[in-house]
Image: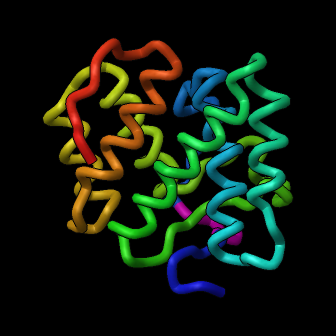
Amino acid sequence: MSPDTKSFMFSIDPGVRTRRELALLPFEQDVLTVSRCFFETYEKPDSQCWMQAFMEAEQRFQPPFGATIAHATHLTINFLQTARGGAFSYFPTSDAMAEYAVTPAEKQLIEVMRAVGAGDVEKAEWAALLLCHGGETERFLAAMERLCLIFGQIEGLRYQG
């Protein structure tokens, strides 16, 4: 297992939430699924889950946006992994829990996306700082912002990363 990622095996963890509890919007659920494929790619490169990520994106998002969204999601995850410098708990897409559960780290990822999409700069920066364990967040936030731009949540770009 790569030091950059860590799959989350279900246990009775008070931090695990359901998608319903978090009221995830359809696009948030879809981005989470694509993100999980990329996390698995970092954990197990030989699995080539990046191909599954692109296939998931092509199936979940209207043409011609699937590949663009997959690429933007990959950049976001890549910069997150670089800034974080530690394990990220996630549910692999093959895990039965993946359909309805969200790890605390995944919840934080969604919180950053929501704050960026809402234009709440202060909340986005604090949430990103926590998620990245104090690492450099500018490139991660810039990538997340571009993802939100694709979904029409924001109109302009603030981060230069």
| Location of residue 39 by image quarter | bottom right
> Relative to the observer, which residue lies in front, 149 or 129?
149
> Relative to the observer, which residue lies in front, 5 or 97?
5
Residue at 38 percent of width and 77 percent of height: 85
Q: How is the image coloured?
A: rainbow
> Relative to the observer, which residue lies in front, 136 or 68?
68
Q: Is residue 31 magenta?
A: no
Q: Is residue 10 magenta?
A: yes
Q: Is residue 97 above or below residue 121?
A: below
Image spot of residue 131 (x, y percent): 34, 58
Image spot of residue 38 (x, y percent): 65, 58
Residue at 74 percent of width and 20 percent of height: 64
Q: How many marks?
A: 0
**Quadrant for the N terminus in the image:** bottom right
| Location of residue 19 by image quarter | top right
Image spot of residue 156 (x, y percent): 28, 18
Residue at 81 percent of width and 54 percent of height: 51
| Location of residue 133 by image quarter | bottom left
Tell me: 97 left or right of 87: right
Q: Is residue 110 above or below residue 36?
A: above
Q: Is residue 14 above or below residue 113?
A: below
Task: Name the chief secondary structure element in magenta.
Answer: loop
Residue at 80 percent of width and 32 percent of height: 58
Question: Which region shows up in magenta?
Answer: 8-13
Image spot of residue 44 (x, y percent): 73, 77
